[in-house]
Image (tube, rainbow, N blue to C red):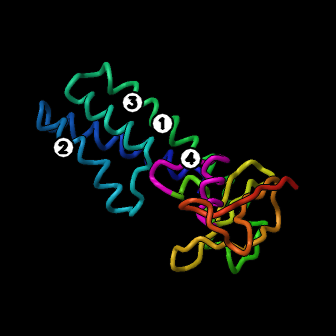
Amino acid sequence: MSGENSTTNAAVTVAAFAIERALGGARGSVAGLAVQPVVWAVTGNGPDAGDAFIYGVGAAGAAAGWILVVPATVTGIIKAAVDDYVGGLVQEAKQDEPEAIRGGIYGTDDYGFWASNNHITAMTIASYGGVAWQHRNGAYLFIKDASDTLICDYHPQSYQRLYRPVLPLRPNGDRVAWTSADF
């Protein structure tokens, strides 16, 4: 997975600028803006909150000129590199878990649109009845079953910090009681 986001980001940036340059003017700017949403649709990987914001700044930059396009492009490149790094940590952490369940393990940044890969998202997952943990390499993970339901009773093989609901599940407001423990 390493480099996947950076490679896609570079290809999208080059394609958008090439289309913009080839068509020129406002038509070129609008056509160039269409490249990223098409890539999201074709790959099935929609944007997270950070990607959507960076795309929005770049879109505003198409109207405002290079003053916004350059920072959005540079920020997008840096974000892609960080996403690749975190994705590599998640893949590494999954290798410590049984092969049969690796497909149901995700980085906590995959939990939702506004989710990040950190302990706040892990606590949120635990409060909704799921198990999340921080691997020794720093990656935060969680597990769900084939129907996308959070699993409440999994115990990871390798963790530094574990976030889990209290079993049996006990209501706590509109969520459930949860706890955390360090290894």
Where is residue 70? Give x, y as percent. Answer: 37, 25
* Image mark for residue 77: 1
Q: Relative to 90, say whether 116 is above or below.
A: above
Residue 72 is tagged as 3
Residue 78: give x, y in percent of width and height: 52, 35
Residue corresponding to mark 4: 116
Q: Return the disc, 3 or 2, that comes first in the chain's sequence.
A: 2
Amino acid at pointer 3: Ala
Label 2: which secondary element: helix
Check whether the beta carbons of the residues at disc 3 and disc 2 lie within 8 A of each other. Answer: no
Give the distance between the C-alpha atoms of the residues marked 2 and 4, in whole angstroms.
31 Å
The x, y position of residue 164, in whole percent, is 72, 63
Give the magenta-colored segment's residue range.
112-129
Is residue 23 shown left or right of residue 140? left
Q: Nearer the viewer, residue 29 or 125?
A: 125
Dot 4 falls on a residue whose secondary structure is: loop
Mark number, residue 147: none
> Counting residues from the N terminus, which is met first, the one under dot 3 or under dot 1?
3
Q: What is the secondary structure assignment of the residue under circle 3?
A: helix
Q: Residues within 10 Å of mark 4 (few under 14, many from 20)?
A: some
